Image: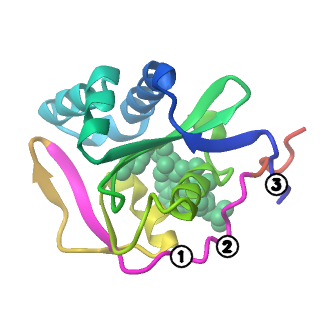
Amino acid sequence: MIPSPSILCRPLRPDEADEACALARAVFDQFVAPEQHDKGRRMFHAFAQPAALLRRHRTRYTTWVAVEGPRVVGVLHLHARNHISLLFTAPDCQGRGIATRLLRTAAEAGGFVAPATVNSSPNAVGFYARLGFAPDGPELLKNGVRHQPMRLPALPLWGHAEPRDLPGAP
Ligand SMILES: CC(C)(COP(=O)(O)OP(=O)(O)OC[C@H]1O[C@@H](n2cnc3c(N)ncnc32)[C@H](O)[C@@H]1OP(=O)(O)O)[C@@H](O)C(=O)NCCC(=O)NCCS
């Protein structure tokens, strides 16, 4: 795989909150919402509003973005440095190592530490498993949101953490 030099991962700037949240909601609607109840969809959309996200920064949350040029292509929202609250990659950029790189960047800055947890959407369980997360109990339904609690005992070696171009990409 060829590393993609055009992807940069860094902390969110406040003026990017609208775009980052719009990305999270759009990717959620496409990949996650079909498996969720209406109540869960509403809960998520309320959670992924820019004002709410920026407000949470006052209470131990941090947010990281992957940008390609002026465009936000990935977003990671962490609570207390060890719980993944949001992790989304733009559909046309998935499979390029962006989500992994977001986690690695946060970890290298001391902003993501293990043991860590995530309430994974059912479709993302395989992604987290590749990083070393393991199911922590059965799938749950809470506030209308179906999720698989998962736990990462130690940070991975980040073997696939360089953003890369897709095979065949120019
Ligand atoms: C899950 C998600 C964030 C992964 O983002 P990404 O940038 O495509 O992830 P990466 O490119 O870093 O993937 C790393 C590896 O995991 C694999 N992978 C990615 N998504 C996967 C999935 N859903 N299931 C199984 N494996 C997956 C990739 O193929 C890659 O493998 P490789 O290193 O052998 O090539 C992205 O697919 C997404 O936004 N999904 C929809 C929203 C979602 O479910 N978010 C999680 C909410 S908890």
Disc on the earlier residue, 2 or 3? 3
Looking at the image, residue 4 sits to the left or right of residue 160; the answer is: right
Name the residue rendered at 38%, 35% in the picture.
Answer: 28
Viewer-closest of 56 and 35: 56
Q: Residue furthest right?
A: 170
Q: Position of residue 163 (x, y in %)?
A: 72, 52
The answer to whether 17 is drawn above or below residue 93 in the figure is: above
Name the residue rendered at 60%, 77% in the picture.
Answer: 157
Q: What amino acid is found at the position of numbered circle 2 in the picture? A: Gly
Badge 1 element: loop
The answer to whether 34 is drawn above or below residue 126 in the figure is: above
Name the image quarter holding the C terminus. top right
Q: Which residue is mark 2?
A: 159
The answer to whether 129 is drawn above or below residue 44 in the figure is: below
Within-10-Å neighbours for mark 2: few <14, some 14–19, many 20+:
few
Q: Does the magenta run of residues contain 23?
A: no
- Alpha-carbon distance for marks 3 and 1? 19 Å
Name the residue rendered at 65%, 54% in the picture.
Answer: 97
Q: What amino acid is found at the position of numbered circle 3 in the picture? A: Pro
Disc on the earlier residue, 3 or 1? 3
Q: Which residue is mark 1?
A: 156
Badge 2 element: loop
Q: Residue furthest left?
A: 143
Range of the magenta residues? 145-163
Which label is found at residue 43?
none
- Alpha-carbon distance for marks 2 and 3? 13 Å
Indicate if the residue with disc 2 has its beta carbon within 8 Å of ligand 1. yes
Q: Which residue is mark 3?
A: 3
- Does residue 89 appear in this view? no
Q: Are marks 2 and 1 in contact (CB under 8 Å)?
A: yes
Q: Position of residue 31 (x, y in %)?
A: 41, 39
- Alpha-carbon distance for marks 2 and 1? 8 Å
